[in-house]
Amino acid sequence: MSSYSTNVKEAPSASVRYSKSEYGFYIACDDRSILKCVNSMLLDSGMVGLSDTEGKIHYLIDGRRGGNYVLGRVKEKVLPLREPSPSESGYEDAIVYRAIDSVLERYGFIQTLTGTRILRFLLFTLYREPKLQKSAAKCLYPLAKPEFQMSSAQVERNLRYAIRKSPKLKDETRLILILRKLLDKTMEEVLERYGRAY
């Protein structure tokens, strides 16, 4: 009976670093080696993807880093897998913009004003993410900054000017209430014209 020995590199105990284009093969001969290898990868990247025989990937996330970390990593992997959002098709965006334009026209906004263009952009953003209404000055105005190359104060000033020029809203003073009102009218317009929200 002959005996032979094989030199198998044990799973690493230090951090595993590799580029995204590489494949890593780790041979683990016992439970302890498997745990050591997985733990090393979790310590390095916080998450490990394991592929089964059908090619489905199962992710193991390091829960020791806390609930917010786990939630962030789950979102990072799940959001790209969801069905394409309406904004990715273009057709639904056109429907929403058409509804916004109709509402702005009904309220007498002057289309050439910068404030009207900002309002159109913000209404579309709010339509897609209604939760931003809660803190317009903190969340919403900064979204318009890169789009229009102006500060949050300039965004607000242009909005107020466009609203003062609107015959139906010139007496309104609270900007967030005006945005909510116009957003509600936009949603009604989309539902009335197309029978469902996009």
Image (tube, helix red, strand yellow):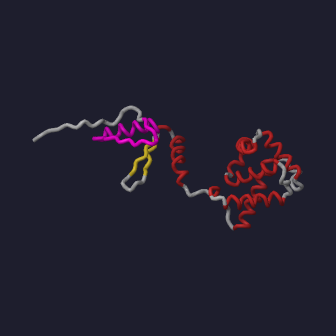
Residue at the spot 80% in from the left edge and 59% down from the top edge: 103
Q: Nearer the viewer, residue 63 or 96?
A: 96
What quarter of the picture does the C terminus occupy? bottom right
Residue that protrudes farthest toward the left in the picture: 1
Residue at image position (35%, 37%) is 36
Picture coordinates of residue 57 (x, y %)?
43, 51
Position of 62 relative to 133 (above/below):
above
Q: Quadrant of the N terminus?
A: top left
Q: Is residue 52 left or right of residue 7?
A: right
Residue 112 against residue 6 in the figure, above or below: below
Q: Is residue 25 left or right of residue 71?
A: left
Residue lying at 69% horizontally and 68% vertically, measured from the top left: 195
Q: Position of residue 196 (x, y in %)?
A: 67, 65
Camera-side residue: 154 or 113? 113
Residue 35 lies, in percent from the top left, at 35, 39
Q: Does residue 21 belong to the magenta stretch?
A: yes
Q: Is residue 182 above or below residue 23?
A: below
Q: Where residue 119 sits: x, y (%)? A: 78, 50
Across the whole image, how many numbered discs are drawn on residues? Answer: 0
Residue projecting furthest to the top: 14
Q: Is residue 132 magenta?
A: no
State the extent of the magenta-drawn residues as a range: 17-45
